[in-house]
Amino acid sequence: MNIRSTGVLVAAALVAAVGFGCRASGPADGPSAGVARTEDGKPNLNGIWQSFTTANWNIEPHSAEAGLRPEIMGAYGAQPGGQGIIEGDAIPYKPEAVAKRDENFKNRMITKITNDPSRFDSGDPELQCFRPGVPRANYMPFPFQIFQDVNQILIVYEYKWAMRPIHIDPQMEAPVDSWMGWSNGKWEGDTLVVDVRGFNGHTWFDRAGNYATDALHVVERWTPQGPNHLQYEATIEDPNVFTRPWKISFPVYRRLEPTVQLVEFNCVPFVEQLMYDPLGLYFPPGTGPDRD
């Protein structure tokens, strides 16, 4: 039986308490035809969505490649090829930032035992089960659920129960830097525009080492293209790393299975052996000093 994460249950309870209404109506033609709407006339984004790209491996165009341990993983560990999601294909890095990107890729399997982001300077944060940040959370190979009311939109990601409130009214400044940043949203017609700042500077865009700093600024645009299809676009800025703003875009699809739900992907137990075994501190369940 599928098990919902604690975060999903909390979010579902929140939406039930709000008690919003919706109506399945929209313009007679155009991209928003047939889009369900909330009582205030905005597109109703409630539901489970998922993208189907290879961007989590590399947001730039890339070929299929063997994984890090092909001698034991074979095709299981291989990287799929993909066309990328960047407008113009290439990230406009500063020359010195390209070297850092390449260093990231070379060191992507390095791990450190720390929960303090200020001390985090190792491989891909995904490897150690840190939260993926924005925009990466939206194109990882996991679904996410949107809960919507008039004043706030909440996105719950299946990956590590990451929860992301989007503040519509009132909008607020980030109280502290974080992995997922701080999201303020507004509607421009049928497009939800989300301004995201307040990142901790340690997130990557993919497994290829593409990265940003704590100066990262992301502006997302979520636009319905029909009842079960959103077009996602994000403009990305970071003057520490890039020579100019650049964009990514890809479609996001509503999951239509009648019993679809988010299931638990708490990745913490999956990384314990990776992190602690080299130090002699990993004990399989039922062993070690605390065994019953």
Image (cartoon, helix red, strand yellow):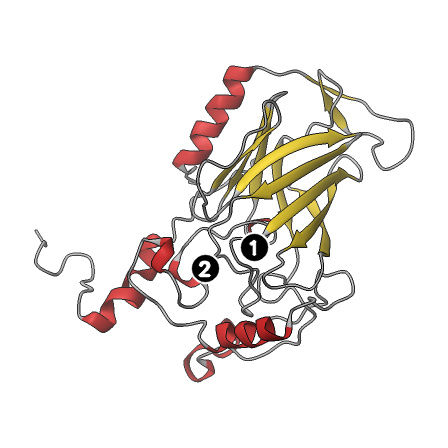
Q: Can you tell which quarter of the image residue 1 is in? A: top left
Type of amino acid under label 2: Glu
Type of amino acid under label 1: Met
Q: Can you tell which quarter of the image residue 253 is in? A: top right
Q: Residues within 10 Å of mark 2 (few under 14, many from 20)?
A: some
Q: Which residue is mark 2?
A: 126
Mark drawn on residue 65: none
CA–CA distance in space, label 1 to label 2: 10 Å
Q: Who's the residue at 71% across and 56% down the image? A: 245
Q: Residue 25 appears at what percent x and percent y?
A: 81, 22
Query: Is there any visible trace of residue 78 in the rendered image?
Result: no
Q: Who's the residue at 77% across and 60% down the image? A: 87
Q: Residue 251 appears at what percent x and percent y?
A: 73, 49
Q: Secondary structure at mark 2?
A: helix
| Residue, far front | 239
Q: Who's the residue at 46% across and 65% down the image? A: 124
Q: Is residue 282 above or below residue 148?
A: below
Q: Secondary structure at mark 1?
A: loop
- Nearest to viewer (mark 1 / mark 2): 2
| Residue, far right | 29
Q: Which residue is mark 1?
A: 140
Q: How many marks?
A: 2
* Residue 76 left/right relative to 87: left
Q: Can you tell which quarter of the image residue 107 is in? A: bottom left
